[in-house]
Image (cartoon, rainbow, N blue to C red):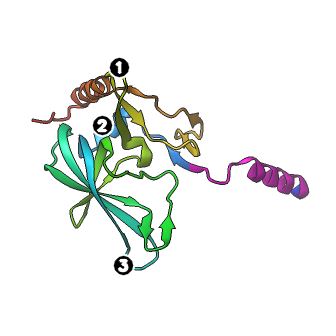
Amino acid sequence: MKRNLAVLVLALLAAAPLTASTFVAMTPNELVAQADAVVVGQVVERFSAWTDSGRLIYTDNTLRVDEVVLGEAPAFVTVRTFGGQVGDVIVEAHGFPQLAGDERVLLFLKDEGDAGAVRVLGYQQGHFRVVTRLDGVTLAVPMVDEGVRLLDRAGQAVAAPESVRLEALKAQILVRAERLGRALAK
């Protein structure tokens, strides 16, 4: 019996992708309810550094806020993400948001209370890249990596969100916020 269990565990480990990260999926309602702000903006500056312990690299991304969809946010916010490059050392944090320079984004933000930095709520689930197609349609593209597994609270796999028109996503956020009794952005 123990041998069969060991073989089963080894088979499951061999079948799992090595780069997979697993996260509890947040519903759209949970994202809206828990976000301190939802904003559309552009990354205008990035700075990576070691944490005080010298064990992790983080990146502070300065985001110019072009539109506040929900909550309140200043004209510029510092969005802290894990990973980055300091000198020759590169740390990639799979499953965590990785903002690119000059990237336009829609972000669900959560205040961390440390030195004014905020984080993206729900890891990559709260990060959408804003892109405009050649036909002029602007989309919000979810940035959940292919190697990321999202599970519901019962442990069942959940499909990653799909691209949607930016205006439709913003409207959905506002409808959910109103249903949840959230104050809308002014």
Rendering coords of residue 105 (x, y %)? 31, 41
In the rendered image, is residue 2 in sight? yes
Circle 3 or circle 2, nearest the eye: 3
First in sequence: mark 2 vs mark 1? 2
> Crowdedness of circle 3 by 10 Å Cα count: few (<14), some, many (20+)?
few
Circle 2 or circle 1, nearest the eye: 1
Q: What is the CA distance from the residue labelled 3 to the residue labelled 1? A: 47 Å
Give the residue drawn at x 37%, y 39%: 129
| Numbered range of the magenta stretch | 3-21
Query: Taking 161 as reference, is 110 left or right?
Result: left
Q: Amino acid at mark 2?
A: Val
Task: Give whichever of 11, 141 is nearer the camera.
Answer: 141
Of the numbered discs in the image, which one, if any, rests on residue 72?
Answer: none
**Split into 4 quadrants, where in the image is the N terminus?**
bottom right
The residue wearing badge 2 is 32
Q: Amino acid at mark 1?
A: Asp
Asked if the magenta segment contains residue 16, the reply would be: yes
Q: What is the CA distance from the residue labelled 3 to the residue labelled 2? A: 32 Å
The residue wearing badge 3 is 52
Q: Secondary structure at mark 1?
A: loop
Query: Taking 56 as reference, is 139 left or right?
Result: left
First in sequence: mark 3 vs mark 1? 3
Give the residue drawn at x 57%, y 39%: 154
> Crowdedness of circle 2 by 10 Å Cα count: few (<14), some, many (20+)?
many
Q: Residue furthest top?
A: 135
Query: Taking 40 as reference, is 154 left or right?
Result: right
In this rendering, is residue 36 above or below 27?
A: below
The residue wearing badge 1 is 135
Asked if the magenta segment contains residue 139, the reply would be: no
